[in-house]
Amino acid sequence: MGLSGVRKVQVSQSLSSSFTDDTGSIVAQPGIAPIGRGRTLLRKLLANRAAVVGGAYIILLLVVAAAPSLFATHHPTRYQNPTNRFAPPSSEHWFGTDNLGRDVYSRVIYGTQVTLWVAFRSVFFGMIIGVTLGIVAGYYGKWVDALIMRMMDILLAFPGILLALAIVSALGASLDNVVIAIAIFSVPTFARIVRGSTLAVRNLEYVEAIRALGARDVKILAQHVLPNVLSPIIVQATLYIATAILIASGLSFLGLGAQPPIPEWGLMLAAGRDFIWNAIHVTLFPGLAIMLAVLSFNLLGDGLRDALDPRLK
Amino acid sequence: MSLGVYIARRLLQMIPVLLGVVFLVFSLLHLVPGDPAMIMAGEQASPVQLERMRERLGLNDPLHIQYLRYLGNALQGDLGSSVRNNRAVTQEIFTSRYWTTLQLATMSIMLAVFIGVTAGVVSAVWRHSLLDTAIMLVALFGLSMPSFWLGIMLIFWFSVQLFWLPAAGWGTLQQAVLPVITLGTAGAAVIARMTRSSMLEVIGQDYIRTARAKGVREAIVINKHALRNALIPVVTVVGLQFGFFLGGSVLTETVFAINGLGRLMVGAIAARDFPVVQGAVLVASVSFMMVNLVVDVTYRFLNKRIELS
């Protein structure tokens, strides 16, 4: 009881410089000075230990992805030693070797690049399309809104990874097609969030005033609506990178994404699956890599959400 | 608005979405780069065989005719026939596959609800305790774990090392244990997080404070006053998760070699058997929509009761 009271005071203080609304859904808090917001955000984020751990791990992943050769001990595909297959972890092969005698550690390292590249691209494209559709729907309303949101409803009618699976099944198995599939999969979520926030911003008095003064729609959208819907977009994008990693590795696991000999984590799991009887390390480490990557983006996303919008607990 | 009117309105609203879903599923065949007839008949197919395949799939007609025919047939329960074995797609799906997946999804959601709600309530009641932190950390790991990897690890421990449970198949209770844990874990994590935040919101409200101030015992405050209201938003999440399980069982079924809808789909994709892929996607999506409808109606019904009482 006492604790929740203390929390409430903190919340109202942090909101003192911003507009609040009572819709209760995911909406932006417009009106905070950008610089002040940036500093407060960073301070709040750094106070969140879980988010710091997640962020630090993501930085490590980015470094590894940028220069995998600095970290790898062997070449991920060319190094093969048929006489040393399924070797358990050792000082020479930290994560052991796989069914072709390749170094699992080096393949996991190079896999970071593959995974992040797929996840970032798919979320980026999905975000661009989704945000555009959401802003257009929320700002113009009426039939435009109805049409766009019905289309989003259709995409959301496919449960889980089924939409991505169906798209890849038609386009063919490749990582680029996985990017397309996950991008399409993530469009409706972005569109929905942004539409809601745009609606809330559009009806604010100052935006209506600017419009009454004759500002062009594009200018209003770019200068006033977009900055105000950024917070929920950033949170959603971070969380969706986690989802994208899970879906991409899942599709590769099913043979619909990366093709051999690409060192992709899901594909490595699929290949190692047949050998869990004698070499569990071949599946253990790529799986851990997926889990830790997903976990770090989830931690950062949760932290960002708490920092950007204290009401969304 | 009465509940009957609400259900009728929701059903009407579903029609355009359903038409769109059928259209997307129909379009899949036309997203295929190159000639779908060639891909399905095989590279070595003679011109006569190709023509027969085109004829069979109706690819010679204009697109809108093809769509209307697919829609019309689908409404009559005809989803075409498998290119591989000529069996009707509906027969392939509903003879046993669909029910297997439904069983798996149902058992998994039951596990997820039981664990998720319990963990979420415990977390909320002892907020900021070590237990709360531990539960939320485990939930975060549960969310972040790839289900197919969890499945493989469970097989490794309980089948390969301990010989406790079978590693594959479906039918006996022992065979169900590992797949249900595999599929249910992420759902349990989502439900636990949702239950916790919903409980915290309710516990902070005035009527709970009033109940406590009146001297009502804490156990009764939690079980009778708080939990009932906190679980209403959880219903929505449970419905969504159940729908995801219907689609997400693809990976679990692959790991445990379970002949459900998901494995049917994966096999059909590998064999380029598009009518089966389309049919399976359509059936899963329509099931998902139905689940969502039931959930929304339940949600409204529960909310109504609160308004009345």
Image (cartoon, coloured by chain):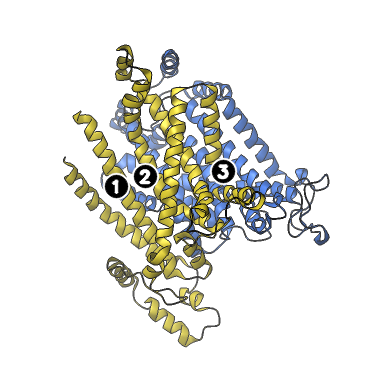
Which residue occupies 39% across, 27% down?
Answer: B199
Quadrant where the C terminus of chain A sits is top left
Rendered hue of chain A is blue
In front here: A183 or A199?
A183
Q: Is residue A216 above or below residue A265?
A: above
Mark 3 burial class by Cα count in 10 Å: few <14, some 14-19, many 20+: many
Q: Is residue A144 visible?
A: no
Q: State the CA–CA distance, disc 3 to disc 1.
A: 29 Å
Q: State the CA–CA distance, disc 2 to disc 3.
A: 21 Å
* Mark closest to the chain's N terminus, 3 or 1: 3
Q: Mark 2: which amino acid?
A: Gly
Rendered hue of chain B is yellow
Residue A104 position in % (x across, y down): 73, 51
Q: Quadrant of residue A46?
A: top right
Q: Are marks 2 and 3 in contact (CB under 8 Å)?
A: no
Residue B242 position in % (x across, y down): 40, 47
Q: Are marks 2 and 1 in contact (CB under 8 Å)?
A: yes
Residue A311 position in % (x across, y down): 41, 25
Which residue occupies 56% across, 56% down?
Answer: B255
Q: State the CA–CA distance, disc 2 to disc 1.
A: 8 Å
Q: Is residue B195 above or below residue B271?
A: above
Q: Mark 3: which amino acid?
A: Met
Residue highlighted by disc 2: B239
Subunit ID for the residue under disc 3: B
Residue highlighted by disc 1: B294
Mark 2 burial class by Cα count in 10 Å: few <14, some 14-19, many 20+: many
Q: Tell me the SS state at disc 3.
A: loop
Q: Is residue B161 above or below residue A311?
A: below
Q: Mark 1: which amino acid?
A: Val
Residue A253 position in % (x across, y down): 59, 56
